[in-house]
Amino acid sequence: MSGKRLLLFAFMLHLFSCSKNNSATDPVTVDPPALPVITGFSPLAAQVDSIVTITGAHFNPDISKDVVRFNGTIAVVKSGTDAQLIVIVPAGASTGKITVTIDAGTATSGEIFTVLVHDQWTVKSSFPGSFMGKITSFRIGNKLYAGIGQAYTGNLQEFWQYDATTGAWTQKASYPAMSLPGLGIGFSIGNKGYVIMSPDSLGYTDLWQYDTALNTWTKRAYFPGSLKQGMTAFSINNFGYVGLGGDGIGRSNKIWQYDPVADSWAPKSDFPGTGSTNSASFVVGSYAYVGTGMNGFNTITGSTEFYRYDPSTDTWTKKADFPGVGRNSAAGFAIGDYGYLGTGYNLSGFYLSDFWQYNPSTDIWAQKNDFGGGVRGEASGFAGDNQGYLGFGSGAAHQAGAMAGYNSIYIDLWEYQP
């Protein structure tokens, strides 16, 4: 090979070698950053300033890069990782979906977050059964059981369940005994309901147990007291407590404890208050609170006294008087560490709508927004996990249906957010 050809061959090898080495500097394909994903959040509903945990994937661990919005309102992110963000429900937030935005894009929640508003009443589904008054009710978990009332056609055995989670009413097995609405009372222990209302053929007072799982009624041990109007019932630590009330002969301050395991009754310390008929009650922790009510029977009266019952010592302790006007036939329930009481009749027999919160730790009452359903007496109340419910009873005018003489009956139900 001539010298020129050797030089050309060497030059070509050099160019080929350089082109291979330069390939290392060619552009490298980089995958785009992953889009954020929201798989869930907890709780599903909360008030402003509450903590919400958002779970998912591809969040930015540098929380300054995560923009969280509640239905468009920007929230403060307290902490976070690639898979979880801890945020605060912002002031001004409204019910809607949650979004998380990072540089790569935006993720939107599949479920709607509900912003709970403080001290607010919202109307729910009305009682769908026969139009009736003097409804008997009890609460088990997030469900209200109600019925066995009085209609213009006579007393009814009809019985229904309201699911506070879904807002749905479902008809259940009818009460199997003679119904005497306005006498006796309903209460619950654990997952069983109980109704005291009916005397047997010998005049003894029957106790009927309702099994929510089987949708059946079973007769249990006779109630040792007599049937009265305006009785009070509550449950503490898997025991039921029933008593008080009045009739044409007089009023009773007696309290009885029911043991569902032994199916037996035992007398407990008498209620010391004067308002022993149509009193209101609620349970906070391991204590019951009972107050207001009539101190007579045939004459309209109303008390403001309030007492705490301690089942561990079987003792009653006087607490701060209810600050509203004296009343009877009020409704009460508890939410968390607070008790609530309102509505009823005043000393002149007029219906009331005011509503109050009681703090057991400070023994102080605070007035809240009036009951959303207007003036009311003999209403039913029960509590859900984070809210209360109040409805039914009698008011200034009936709601629906021909009721003949019963023209002040209500069948509505309202939810209260504290």
Image: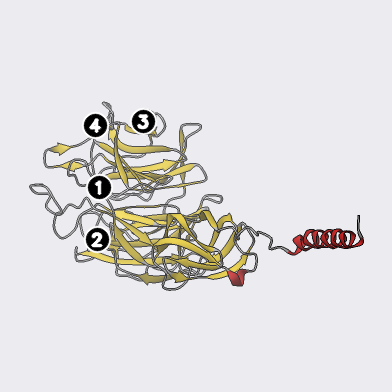
Which callout, 4 or 2, points to the residue nearer the camera?
2
Identified by mark 2, the residue type is Gly
Residue 229 in percent (x, y) is at 27, 47
Circle 2 SS class = loop
Q: Secondary structure at mark 4?
A: loop
Q: Is residue 278 visible?
A: no
Residue placed at 84% from the left, 61% from the top?
Answer: 8
Secondary structure at badge 1 equals loop
Instruction: Answer with the quarter of the image where residue 353 lies.
Output: bottom left
Q: First in sequence, mark 4 or 2: give its number.
A: 4
Q: What's the CA distance linking mark 1 and mark 2?
A: 29 Å
Q: Earlier in the sequence, mark 4 or mark 3?
A: 4
Answer with left or right where residue 69 lies relative to residue 382.
right
**Image spot of residue 332 (x, y percent):** 36, 57
Mark 4 against mark 1, which lies toward the viewer? Answer: 4
Q: Earlier in the sequence, mark 1 or mark 2?
A: 1
Q: Which residue is mark 1?
A: 247
The residue under label 4 is: 178
Numbered circle sitting on residue 215? 3
Real-space Cα separation, disc 3 to disc 2, in angstroms: 31 Å
Choose the circle earlier in sequence order: 3 or 1: 3
4 and 1 marks in contact (CB < 8 Å): no
Relative image position of residue 223 (x, y in whole percent): 37, 36
Name the mark nearer the viewer: 1 or 2: 2
